[in-house]
Amino acid sequence: MKRFVFLILFLISSSGNLLPQTGFYENGVVSSANEIASQVGIDILKNGGNAIDAAVGTGFALAVVYPQAGNIGGGGFMVIHLSDGRNTSIDYREKAPLRAYREMYLDQQGDVIMNLSTLGNLASGVPGSVAGMLYALEKYGTKEKEEVLKYSFELAENGFHINRQLADNLNSYQKDFQNFSGTMEVFGGNFKEGDLLIQKDLAKTLKRIIDKGKDGFYGNETAALLVDEMINSNGIISYDDLAGYEAKERNVIEGTYRGYKIISMGPPSSGGISLVYLLNILENFDLNKNGYGSADNINIMTEAMRRVYADRSEFMGDADFVSVPFDILTNKNYAVKRMSDFKEGVAGSSRDVKHGDAYYRESDQTTHYSVADKYGNLVSVTTTLNDVFGNKVVVKGAGFFLNNEMDDFVSKPGAPNIYGLVGNEANSIQPGKRMLSSMTPAIIFKNDKPFLILGSPGGGRIITTVLQTLVNIIDFNMSLQEAVDAPRFHHQWLPDEIQIEKNYTDGNITDQLEKIGYSVRIINDFGRVDAVQFTEDGKMTGYSDRRGSGKAIGY
Ligand code: GLY
């Protein structure tokens, strides 16, 4: 008992308000959705790599061991803080193919054709992950690609034992897989935990990337296999699309919240702007006084979410194509003005704006990982195929899933996508344009020192998942584990309802919210945060959300 009390006192005194998540480390932490992938990152750090090397190694490993969302056939965003103090971000979001056009998912009556933007090759944007990860490695890494990618190659070539989550996911998508022979060759069958999954075609693709770099994916044999796949089943990605794909380095979005500094991803993600905008609103309210989970706080936060998601729908898209009013949306005065009609204890309404019949997927479509090294480099990456296993098509002979990211565009103004999100002209389909994302890879600083790296999957709920994790730590003094595991809620303007996880703290919360005029829908768990947090004395700890089956590893 005495030893136990001593341990608790030691942990509290050595780490501020932190509880033991993974332990505390001095050299590095990698937190991702899969233990094998996290270990790859740690091995790279142990061999002298920096956080960028480790993030890229982890990213390629996730493409092998977590094919639900880890990918080389999708896209993502990487936010980086370098040990010399610079901040940057790399955009490797998918692009609409050159032959894409605004009404491509509509029938002759102008109605959205079911499944066309989600299933099969017409749903796929031009993949960006390989270009983005190699760009990051070449510019900010210290290791050669041979060394960083050898882990993923070996995992594909020699196989790995699948976990229960992957076995279950593979089994539940067999019906969709049956439409695509390339997918059945690799992932057809009945799987169980512990099965050895060998992916020879994927290994060959990874070897081509190791040997030829970007050309090993966007040119040569991989490009030929991908274009053949398109020709065979109605897709439109061409050699020109592949040859023309480039990752883009962009300025980060910056904001502050109660003295903390936030950096995150700008357009084509809505994540960074929306997070800063939400925090700018919440800074004007004493959330701590009301307490975590109180109806008063849900009222305030919901009205903030309603306004931010309304602006997301109207103003946000690929800033290379449309003018996004960054400065206004992240301005603290604008946040105050937007809440000027808010009445405490009263539900607002989004009913003035029409929306279609939203339907939702509760599954994990995207994945986030956070990496820190002993030099002070921090990396926050969110990457996606969009839906689970993307468009469900494995490129025949190349072994990887393609994305269905085209569904993140607005197929028709007011028609909801798979997350129930609606949008407008700013996010309409145009050739070469990047579709709007909600991915919110973020890095937080306290007194200019690293404090937290975090992000999450969850479609339109990514932003509110990251927001609540931050608020739980900053306003409610929760430990990292408590903040990540605490039940969440979400509002996205349309549909006008509060979506609330079924194990939300207070059993009466639904009644309380309905009483003040809200419509409440109980939903399954959402978001899977993978985070790294720093103590005052510079040690690091990590945590992988209880909702997933990932792992944070440190050394
Ligand atoms: N595909 C999910 C997102 O990018 O928001």
Image (tube, helix red, strand yellow):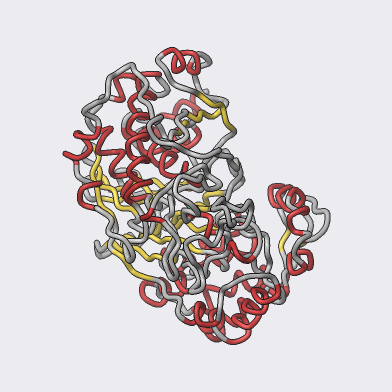
| As drawn, 529 above or below 127 | above
Q: Quadrant of residue 371?
A: bottom left
Rendered location of residue 13, percent (x, y): 35, 34
User: 510 or 407, which lies in front?
Assistant: 407
**Count of numbered marks:** 0
Residue at image position (58%, 47%) is: 364
Residue 466 on image: x %, y %? 41, 42
Q: Residue at x 54, y 29 (%)?
A: 501
Query: Residue 3, relative to residue 528: is it above or below?
Result: above
Taking the view exactly as shown, the residue that stands out farthest to the front is 109
- Residue at the far right in the pictured view: 190
Instruction: Tell me if residue 129 can be seen.
Output: no
| Drawn side of residue 81 relative to residue 149, left or right | left
> Which residue occupies 56% across, 56% down?
106
Q: Is residue 489 above or below residue 356?
A: above
In the depicted view, which residue is nearer to us: 465 or 518?
A: 518
Q: Is residue 322 above or below residue 140?
A: above
Q: Position of residue 291 (x, y in %)?
A: 36, 21
Residue sitting nearer the eye, 198 or 451: 198
Q: Residue at x 58, y 65 (%)?
A: 61
Task: Please say whether residue 70 is visible from this viewpoint.
Answer: yes
Query: Measured from the top left, where is residue 375 in percent x and y?
Result: 34, 62
